[in-house]
Image (spheres, rainbow, N blue to C red):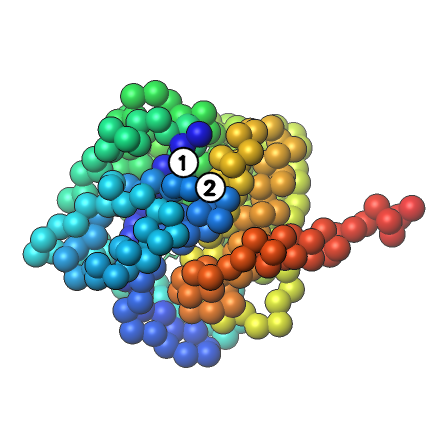
């Protein structure tokens, strides 16, 4: 078993009703690999940063069992930068800046030691690069999970559709599912999106949980009602990282196990939003994670109510 994660490794500047950060470490691959590292090690990342990225930040990833051989460092260039501001309800956010910097010319190199990749997480990144990574792996992985966002729907739809066709699981939010399919009903949207290629579709609905679609079946996992949501940044990537981490650790791609992975991913995401950036993901214990998952089970124990 080997898990490879690609995506941005970035600097983020975040504004929520509770405060504001200067540039802090973020990026889709950062959140996803940290989340997956609680299920499986090593997590091998493929990404790029500039020379503004601190050695201590790379060391932080390595301390969590993230293999950074595939992380390129471009001298004289700047890392990908994203700035966002959340509305008071924390459900919607405006992107204030997306500076591609090193990402604009990124040519992903897959180290030889990554060629044993069985599970591939295509974290949010240029869809053309996501596709290149699939093509540069000698053997097709057993399962490819892809995350993306509206930014790529607006700027690179053709590339996006070509990449979506090549993956097993697509993970997007409800707004993105509507934009991609042109359907308001999420059931209709799911049907159209599954026809594009993926066997499974995850539609994330923020504080309202996530839906997993497969053929005509659908599974729902709520989000945990949390007393304090501090910063939703990275929740989607953390969800995806937790999701594929669980599948890689169990080496089971059945629908039943994917449901279990959705619960695990949701539990990981619920931690992520409790602090700014990656902070809450840095020091979790397995006991805390199991306790969270149990809270999900208690939340939806409907069989007993109906009995
Ligand atoms: P999420 O909140 O799960 O959508 O993820 C937020 C993370 O995605 C931040 O850490 C950003 O650095 C990163 N991000 C924002 N915009 C993009 C983009 N267009 N492509 C790739 N990553 C992005």
How crowded pointer 1 is (Cα within 10 Å; few <14, some 14-19, many 20+) is rated as: many
Whereabouts is ligand 1, in terms of quadrant? bottom left
Q: Nearer the viewer, residue 262 or 150?
A: 262
Q: Residue 145's quadrant in the figure?
A: top left
Residue ID at (62%, 67%) = 226
Q: Position of residue 113 (x, y in %)?
A: 28, 31
Q: Position of residue 152 (x, y in %)?
A: 33, 46
Residue ID at (53%, 30%) = 251
Compared with residue 270, is residue 144 higher up or lower down, i.e. above or below?
above
Q: Nearer the viewer, residue 54 or 155?
A: 54
Asked whether disc 2 touches disc 1, contact meaning CB atoms under 8 Å apart, the reply is yes
Looking at the image, is mark 2 or mark 1 nearer the viewer? 2
| Label of residue 54 in the image | none
Q: Secondary structure at mark 2?
A: loop
Compared with residue 139, is residue 31 higher up or lower down, i.e. above or below?
below
Q: Earlier in the sequence, mark 2 or mark 1?
A: 1
Tell me if I can see residue 126 in this picture: no
Residue ID at (65%, 33%) = 256
| Label of residue 3 in the image | 1
Q: Nearer the viewer, residue 239 or 252?
A: 252
* Residue underneath mark 2: 40
Q: How many marks?
A: 2
């Amino acid at each position: 078993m080997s898990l490879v994660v690609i995506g941005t490794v970035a600097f983020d500047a975040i504004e929520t009703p509770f405060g504001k950060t200067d540039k802090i470490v973020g990026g889709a691959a950062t959140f996803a690999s940290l989340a997956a590292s609680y299920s499986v090690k090593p997590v091998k990342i493929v990404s790029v940063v500039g020379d503004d990225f601190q050695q201590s930040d790379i060391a932080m990833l390595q301390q969590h069992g993230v293999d950074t051989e595939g992380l390129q460092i471009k001298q004289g260039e700047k890392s990908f930068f994203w700035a966002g501001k959340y509305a008071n309800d924390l459900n919607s956010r405006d992107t204030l800046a997306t500076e591609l910097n090193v990402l604009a010319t990124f040519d992903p190199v897959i180290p030889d030691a990554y060629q044993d990749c069985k599970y591939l997480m295509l974290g949010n990144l240029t869809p053309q690069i996501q596709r290149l990574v699939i093509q540069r792996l000698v053997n097709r992985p057993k399962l490819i999970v892809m995350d993306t966002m509206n930014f790529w729907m607006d700027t690179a739809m053709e590339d996006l559709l070509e990449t979506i066709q090549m993956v097993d699981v697509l993970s997007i939010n409800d707004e993105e599912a509507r934009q991609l399919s042109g359907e308001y009903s999420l059931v209709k949207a799911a049907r159209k999106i599954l026809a594009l290629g993926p066997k499974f579709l995850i539609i994330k609905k923020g504080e309202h949980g996530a839906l997993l679609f497969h053929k005509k079946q659908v599974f729902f996992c709520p989000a945990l009602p949390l007393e304090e949501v501090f910063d939703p940044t990275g929740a989607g990537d953390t969800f995806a990282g937790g999701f594929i981490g669980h599948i890689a650790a169990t080496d089971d791609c059945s629908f039943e196990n994917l449901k279990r992975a959705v619960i695990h991913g949701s539990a990981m995401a619920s931690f992520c939003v409790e602090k700014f950036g990656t902070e809450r993901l840095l020091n979790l214990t397995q006991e805390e994670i199991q306790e969270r998952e149990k809270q999900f089970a208690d939340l939806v124990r409907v069989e007993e109510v109906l009995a």
